[in-house]
Structures are given as structure tokens and as C-alpha cells.
Image (spheres, rainbow, N blue to C red):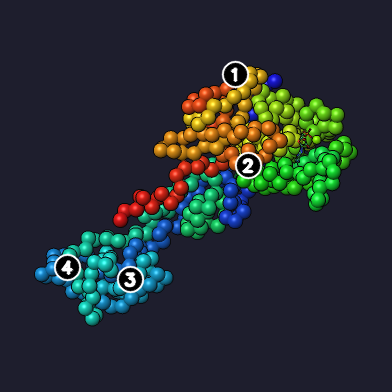
Amino acid sequence: MIPLAEAQAAALALAGPRPVVEASLDDAMGAVLAAPVFVEDPLPPFDNTGMDGFALRAKDTAGASATQPARLRILGTMAAGASPDMLHVAEGTAVRIMTGAPIPAGADAVAIVEEVSVEEDFLVLTRPVEPGANVRRRGSDADVGERILGPGTVVTPTVRGLLASLGVRKVFTYRRPRVAVLSTGDELTSEHPLPPGKIYDSNRPALLGLVAEAGAVPIDLGTVGDDPDALRTVLSEGAAAADLLLTSGGVSVGDFDYTKQVIDELGTMRWLQVAIKPAKPLALGTIGSTPVLGLPGNPVSSIVSFELFARPLIRKMLGTARWHRPVLRAALTEPIYRRADGKLHLVRARAEVRDGALIVAPYRLQGSHVLSGLAGANVLALVPDGEGLPAGASVDVVLIGELDGPDGASLLGHDAS
Ligand code: AMP
Ligand code: MG
């Protein structure tokens, strides 16, 4: 058996970032920027008001008080989208203005609507307005020439919004890898009801989803039986179409485990016995220039194997420097029993934040065929070789899902009023 870190290094050595492409913002979602983005147009593009109110000349309000209010004649109204030169604020005048509207020529401040009163055509102010008050200056968010995003940035929905706000329509990204997923096994069927001895293919739906979630483009290669000829055909076609091939099943030591053999025939193959439980067997290799990971067939094993070997490789191919999931430290709510077997155990568990600290509860059913435990898990607890850990012990956990915490409704307790 080889240590997990060594197996991960072997998987990561299979490929690097994909070539750089110029992509539309639509196509760039989830991809990683390969070059910095510089601001070409100032943001905001023009001076505008951050509040509903009245645009005016600050000096016309100097000295205003309850006893000596400033009175400014209202020239008209400017809404968002109006042209900045629609109205001109001269001495003693003001313009009613809506959030996002340009500051009219001549004005240098905005008095907010809640702090003034209107008497017929006149604005009445009982206190002075500071020059620049409530004005969002042209270029104050981002100025021309500024490096707003660096290479390595993932194009998240917010980043996409930022790029759109800057008028950027195309960016240089690493091309997202196409990852092909194949299930193997004579027992797999999609027939309802299940014929005797058959099972549904759960690995492919899970892995295709994980591929997409990791940021890659999934390709569904379907299922093939335990038939070397059929495997050869699908694997060579898959290798030609994809940047990475993922198979599940057929990599242990059973009589009909052909995956390893066929990868070896078509290219190169290395079979690893990783010192972990679940997901001990792993085949890795290449067909042509396409890397292949042969994941184990047991549903939990195939997903854990994806998490440990395929996901970091996909992240590397995407061009990000963050290949691995974060590891946190949590306190066990219950003991974990295990036997010494020379392996690191990856225990499916649920972590949550309670009173600001992270606690973790292991699932009872830990069989590598029991998907329900993994489906509910948001962490894999890393339980080192030995006799297990007592309740209260702290354990490293790999965060593979969303962290639980106090319900979002408790945010209401943070209301200002
Ligand atoms: P194998 O690695 O091919 O020996 O498969 C190990 C176990 O995983 C067997 O019980 C298989 O039936 C099961 N298995 C393999 N592939 C799948 C799959 N795609 N979906 C569900 N179970 C599978
Ligand atoms: Mg099989």
C-alpha cells in the first residue's frame, strides 16, 4: 500500500492547466482567468447620485439652519438614465434626482429626500450640505488602467457581474476540461423494475454531477458491461473526446475486472493500492495524451476516490492554484471505533458550527456500498491508523459539502432596529 499523499501526487502529475482561450462571459462561468483584467472604462462611468434627493450647489446651503433655512428653486426632475446635461444647476437652484441619475451640470452635492422639505417649487434646507455629499464619483469604484482581477481568479457569478459592469465581454481563461465518465459492470441496468441480479448505475450520475460541480464539462459515456472489447471501444473514443477519463468499477482483483487491463493495453497504466479506507484501489494512466483515473466500483469508494484524486486533478486542469478541499478541525460528538489496519480511514460525518465551534458526528453505517451515509455527509473525518478516537477528541475533517450552523433565521437577531 502507498500513502494517500503519494497517490494524490501521482494523480496530480497526470495533467496541467488546459490551453488558454478567449471566452465570452457566458462560457467563462466557473473557469479560471489566465490573464489579469484591466479597467478600460471608469466605473461608475459618470458622477451619479447614491440617494434619492436633490442635486444642488453645496455653497448655496452654507449656513442654513432651522431659523435661517436655505431656499432653492427646483428646476425639474432627473431619473436614472437621464442625460447629465438635461438640466443645469445655477446659483439658488436644485434638481430633484433619483438614485443612479447623473449629477446635473453645475451641482456638486445631493441632499437626501428624508432631510429636506419642499414648499411648492422650492426646496427648503435647515442644515448645510457638504460638497460631494451622496455623490458617487466617476471612476471611484474602478479607474481606467487599474488591474481589477488577477490571473487565477475563478469566474464566479459575482465576478461575472463585476466584469459585465465594466463592459468586459470577453476574458482569457484556461479552457475548462471536458471530463468523460464511464460506468462498468454486467450488473448495471436502467430497466424498471430491476431484473434479478441487476442494480442501477449510481456512480455515473454521481460522478457526472461532481465533475460539473468541480467546474469541468461532463461527458456521459454511459455504461459498458464486463467485456474487454466493448471497454476498448468506449475508452479509446472517450480518450479522443475528453481531457480526462473517469471510469468506475473493474479495478480490484475480481475475475471480471477488465478496466485496468484495457487501460494498460491502450496506453499506460499504474495500479495503486492506497492506504485508505474506503477507496483503496486506483488505476491511473493515460490513453494517448488523455489521463485516465480508474475509480473503484463501490458507490462510496468511487465518490471518495473522486474527491481525493479526480477533483484535485480537475482543479489543476482548470488552472486554479486551489486544488484541494479545505481541512478543518472539529470535536467529535461520539467516539469512532476502528481497528489498526495500516490505513487512514475517511469517515463519513456531519459537521456543524455550534456556539462558534465546529463539532462533528460520524454516521453509523460506514460500509463502502452504503451511499446514504455519504449523501448526508458534509465532511470526511480523517481517522488515523489505530484503535479510533474517543468522544470529544479533535479530528481533522475534509469539507466536502456545505457547513451546517445555526439556521439563517437567527440572522434576524442581528437586526439593527
Ligand atoms: P467492482 O469494482 O467492479 O468490483 O464493483 C464493486 C462493487 O461496486 C460491486 O458491488 C458493484 O456492483 C458495485 N458497482 C460497480 N459499479 C457500480 C455503479 N456504476 N453503480 C452502482 N454500483 C456499482
Ligand atoms: Mg465490476
The answer to which of marks 1 and 2 sits earlier in the sequence is 2
The label number, if any, that marks residue 126 in the structure image: 4
Q: Residues within 10 Å of mark 2 (few under 14, many from 20)?
A: few
Q: Where is residue 88? Give x, y as percent.
A: 30, 74
Residue 86, relative to residue 262: is it above or below? below
Q: Indicate the amino acid at tag 1.
A: Gly
For numbered disc 1, what is the local secondary structure?
A: loop
Q: Residue at x 47, y 42 (%)?
A: 405
Identify which residue, 50 or 333, lies in the foreground: 333
> Foreground mark, 2 or 4?
2
The answer to which of marks 4 and 1 sits earlier in the sequence is 4
Identify which residue, 221 or 14, lies in the foreground: 221
- Name the image quarter holding the N terminus: top right
Q: Indicate the amino acid at tag 2.
A: Ala
The label number, if any, that marks residue 97 in the structure image: 3
Q: Indicate the amino acid at tag 3.
A: Ile
Identify which residue, 72 or 336, lies in the foreground: 336
For numbered disc 3, what is the local secondary structure?
A: strand
Discs 3, 2 touching: Cβ within 8 Å: no
Inspect this view and state whether residue 32 appears: yes
* Label 1 sits on residue: 386
Q: Indicate the amino acid at tag 4.
A: Thr
The answer to which of marks 4 and 3 sits earlier in the sequence is 3
Whether residue 368 sits left or right of residue 118 in the image: it is right
